[in-house]
Each structure stands twice: as C-alpha cells, then as structure tokens.
Amino acid sequence: MSTPDLVPQPTVQPTRTGLGIVLGLVASLAFATSGVFVRPLLEAGWTPGAAVFWRVAVASVLLLPAGLWSMRGRLRDLVSEWRLLAGFGALAVATAQLFYFAAVSRLSVGVALLIEYLAPVALVLLAIARTRRLPGRLVLAGSAASVVGLVCVLDLTGARVDGLGVVFGLLAMCGAAGYFVLGARATRLPAIALPAFGLPVGAVVLGLAILVRVLPYSAPLVDVDLMGCRCRGGCRWRWSSSRRPRSPTCSGWPASP
C-alpha cells in the first residue's frame, strides 16, 4: 500500500479549501465537547456503552431523514456501497466513540483527546513503516505541529494517567484513523450519506452488544451539573424474568438552575 493510501489527500477546489478547514474545525470542536458533556454522566453511574449508544442513536434519528432525501432515486448506489457503510459504522462510529468515552471514564478529557487526536500522526507513521520512505517535509512538519499544538491547547494540568485508560484511548485513535481513511475514499455517495447511514449501523452494533450483554449497560436516572444547571436524565432498560429486554424508559429535563 502506498503512502497516499494511508494518508488520504483528496483533490479539492482551492476556493473550497477555506470552507473545508472551517467545517473541520467545527467538527473537531463538536466532538471534543462530547467528553465534557458525558463526563458528569459517567461519574454519576452511566457506563460508556450506554452514553455512546444513546448519543449515536439520537444522531441517527436526526440525520437519517437527510440521508434518505439525499439518496432519493439512488438507492442502488447506497446498496452498492454497503461495505463502506458497514465499516464506517462499526469502526469510525462505534469503535471510536465507545473507546473514547471509555477513556474519558478513566482519564481526564484532555488526555483522552490528546491520544485520540493523534490518529493522523499514526497514519503518517504507519505509512513510513510500510513504505520505508519519508513523506514530504510539509507532512512531517504538520505532524510535528499537530503534536505540539495538542499539548499546548489541551489542559493537561493535574491529569491522571491510567494504563487501561491509555489503552482505550489508543483504540479510540484506531477508530478515528479508520474514520479518516474511510471518509476519504472515493464514492458515489453524497457527503451527508456516509454519516447518515453509518450512524445507524454503529447504533445497531452497539445495541446488539448491549442486548447480548457483551457491552455493560447502565443509565440510571440521576441529577448532574451541566454548565451551572442541575439536569436530570437517564434511560433504563427493564428486564423480564427471562432476562430479555422489555422496553427502555427515558427521560431528561432541567431539574433546577
């Protein structure tokens, strides 16, 4: 496999480069804040599996209509790309988010982000190992700058380091690397289709793991502090005597300012 295969560099129009950078920064910020929002739930008794399942499930409900609209009259293209969608849902969605939340449950949010966001650097190192060739100076400089920048902007003061948490962070990094590789593949699908149909795949994978009890699930109804507001939320699964899930009970609302 050549270096461009591992470090995708899609050709874009120069006039759209600025917009792409802005969208990338917004997406990074949105994902980074997820750790801040989920941390109170994890400390209150939620498992990482429960948090990521409901995050992915809600996102699926919101994006699926847009995905169906974008693929109207082109469902054959959607079926032909089922391998891409399955891989994206299992690796980029389920693996990356599950292990990131698992890392956040044992590490500070800053350290967990630092490890996962090294995914592009890991792709560069993998390309060097496979091809035995160094990439261009710009790629090396960008990789070094990304490491230095992450260390500078993330709050690592007083961070606690946990061995298992680091392993979870590295697994999340692998999922994020898969996100970059799969997202850069040439496809006939519109841009919105990949997350719109990949998210439901990830939700199904996580849901099946919960149902067969491979993935621990706990989402008690608890009060948490969020941005100065006392909020209450939870989603409990009721289990019958046959140990089969019956129905989920969900709720979430501000409890007090």
Image (tube, grey):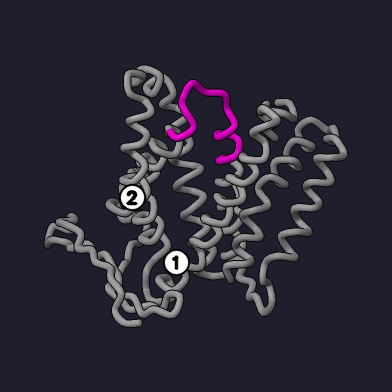
Q: Where, by quadrant of the figure, is residue 205 drawn?
A: top left
- Residue 228, given in percent of the width and then of the height, sits at 44, 80
Check the image and name the residue furthest to the left. 241
4 shown above or below 74: below
The quarter of the rendered structure image containing the N terminus is top right
Q: Nearer the viewer, residue 179 or 106?
A: 179
Q: Which numbered disc flags the more N-terminal residue, 1 or 2?
A: 1
Badge 1 element: helix
What is the three-letter code of the residue carrying label 1?
Answer: Val
Dominant secondary structure, magenta = loop
- Residue 73, given in percent of the width and then of the height, sits at 32, 18
Asked whether residue 171 is in view, the answer is no
The residue depicted at 58 percent of the width and 28 percent of the height is 185
Left or right, 155 with reference to 43: right
183 shown above or below 220: above
Q: What mark, if any, has residue 38 been given in the picture?
A: 1
- State yes or no: residue 137 in magenta: no
Q: Which residue is mark 2?
A: 57
Q: Which range of residues does the magenta coloring cover?
A: 178-192
The residue depicted at 24 percent of the width and 66 percent of the height is 251
Badge 2 element: helix
- Residue 237, given in percent of the width and then of the height, sits at 22, 62
Check the image and name the residue furthest to the right. 137
The residue depicted at 32 percent of the width and 23 percent of the height is 72
The quarter of the rendered structure image containing the C terminus is bottom left
